[in-house]
Image: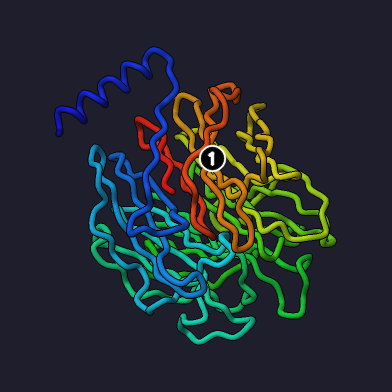
């Protein structure tokens, strides 16, 4: 088996040296779960968290696909409190980051069964970490101290120096979307303690209440991405970038969309050592992506149905992959789709179509050092 894997890797390297696009591999989520989120470690092993159970109150499971192996390790439950996670709405799923010394950090929006007991305005944003390589997770903690009003899940980022940052959007209970803000709480000790949350950016853009957001560490900065809701109609996409320690984030608008409704949309970030890529849902059921700081950008027109929940992956040679769910909606399943692009953001072939996906699910696309992997 090892000789076969070695031969496959050698052939992949030979193909890559000839300028060929990386291979695209589909991998089912562990434990038969939905809404996978994934990270790749320095050795090329794939770390995945997925959801299983009733969409209104289920559990999160963590598993690893070691590099060169064909099966995930035994899954470990992340949440200590039974059924404390939620999947309804797709964009409220878990977020995963790998930090210093291989620590795994997971954040998620608590279900109605989560502790502490919540009411309409006090839904918790829960956090748990593993400090032993994913064998166990510490009991989850609610990171919100004052900025309640959570919707759209949250997002987490971690770096190799012990910093962990958790983001969410919320506003005063009596405020509408234009009053919502992006909040961040920071840890400098690998998630052992967190400071009280602060507003990440001082621009009054509002935030789309039931849209998701994403965050990650890459290219030397922490990044966060969200959909605004200025005057309830300016549903623009913004990308935030960390500044010097202790300073607020800076932001830039990536896309505009005028609509007086919440599109329940998602977005995605990917990195190489010196490059950032961002993807989001655009007007008309299309997808879009951009590499900030360059002129590389593209739109992916919708197919027979709207394309939602993009996940972008970036290879060091400039190839990138965008995966999505096509035809999905509220309590409506769809099917997997993806498109590969070259280093000039030109499509490589036609969009590909994959298997059906369950209700409320979405894909996770990563580059593992040799190939693109889509967990579905």
Q: Residue 219 appears at what percent x and percent y?
A: 50, 39
Quadrant where the N terminus sits is: top left
Against 266, residue 107 (above or below) is: below
Residue at 49% in and 60% down: 165
- Depth check, front residue: 232 or 310: 310
Q: Quadrant of the rendered structure where residue 164 is? A: bottom left
Q: Can residue 242 be seen in this view?
A: no
Q: Is mark 1 on a helix, strand or loop?
A: strand
Colour convention of the picture: rainbow
Residue at 75% in and 62% down: 206
- Depth check, front residue: 238 or 357: 357
Q: Can residue 77 be seen in this view?
A: yes
Q: Residue furthest top?
A: 18
Q: Quadrant of the rendered structure where residue 183 is? A: bottom right
Against 170, residue 241 (above or below) is: above
Against 352, residue 197 (above or below) is: below
- Depth check, front residue: 215 or 221: 215
| 6 to the left or right of 328 | left
Q: Residue 79 appears at what percent x and percent y?
A: 37, 72
Report which residue position mark 1 lands on.
337
Q: Residue 232 appears at what percent x and percent y?
A: 82, 62
Q: Residue 150 appears at what percent x and percent y?
A: 61, 72
Residue at 42% in and 32% down: 24
The image shows a total of numbered marks equal to 1
| 239 to the left or right of 23 | right
| 65 to the left or right of 287 | left
| 88 to the left or right of 171 | left
Q: Quadrant of the rendered structure where residue 253 is? A: top right
Residue at 41% in and 50% down: 38
The local crowd at label 1, few if under 14, some if 14 to 19, many if 20 or more residues have their Cα within 10 Å, is: many
């Amino acid at each position: 088996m090892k000789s076969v894997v070695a031969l496959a890797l050698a052939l992949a390297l030979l193909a890559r040296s000839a300028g060929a696009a990386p291979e695209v591999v589909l991998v089912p989520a562990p434990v038969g779960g939905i809404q996978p989120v994934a990270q790749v470690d320095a050795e090329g092993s794939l770390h995945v968290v997925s959801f299983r159970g009733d969409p209104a109150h289920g559990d999160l499971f963590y598993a690893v696909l070691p590099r060169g192996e064909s099966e995930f390790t035994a899954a470990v439950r992340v949440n200590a409190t039974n059924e404390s996670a939620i999947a309804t709405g797709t964009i409220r799923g878990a977020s995963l980051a790998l930090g210093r010394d291989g620590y795994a950090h997971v954040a998620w929006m608590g279900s109605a069964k989560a502790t502490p007991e919540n009411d309409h305005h006090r839904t918790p944003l829960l956090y748990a970490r593993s400090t032993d390589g994913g064998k166990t997770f510490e009991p989850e903690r609610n990171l919100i101290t004052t900025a309640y009003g959570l919707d759209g899940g949250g997002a987490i980022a971690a770096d190799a120096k012990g910093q962990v940052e958790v983001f969410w959007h919320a506003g005063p209970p009596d405020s509408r979307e234009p009053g919502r803000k992006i909040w961040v709480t920071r840890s400098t000790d690998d998630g052992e303690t967190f400071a009280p949350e602060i507003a990440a950016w001082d621009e009054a853009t509002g935030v789309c209440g039931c849209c998701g957001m994403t965050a990650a560490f890459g290219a030397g900065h922490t990044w966060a991405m969200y959909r605004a809701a200025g005057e309830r109609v300016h549903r623009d996409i913004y990308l935030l970038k960390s500044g010097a320690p202790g300073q607020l984030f800076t932001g830039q608008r990536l896309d505009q969309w005028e609509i007086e409704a919440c599109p329940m949309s998602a977005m995605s970030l990917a990195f190489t050592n010196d490059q950032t890529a961002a993807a989001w849902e655009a007007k008309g059921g299309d997808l879009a992506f951009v590499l900030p700081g360059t002129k590389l950008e593209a739109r992916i027109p919708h197919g027979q149905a709207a394309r939602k929940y993009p996940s972008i992956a970036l290879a060091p040679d400039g190839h990138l992959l965008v995966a999505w769910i096509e035809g999905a909606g509220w309590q409506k399943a769809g099917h997997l789709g993806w498109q590969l692009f070259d280093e000039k953001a030109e499509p490589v072939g036609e969009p590909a179509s994959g298997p059906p996906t369950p209700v409320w699910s979405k894909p996770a696309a990563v580059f593992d050092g040799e190939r693109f992997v889509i967990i579905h």
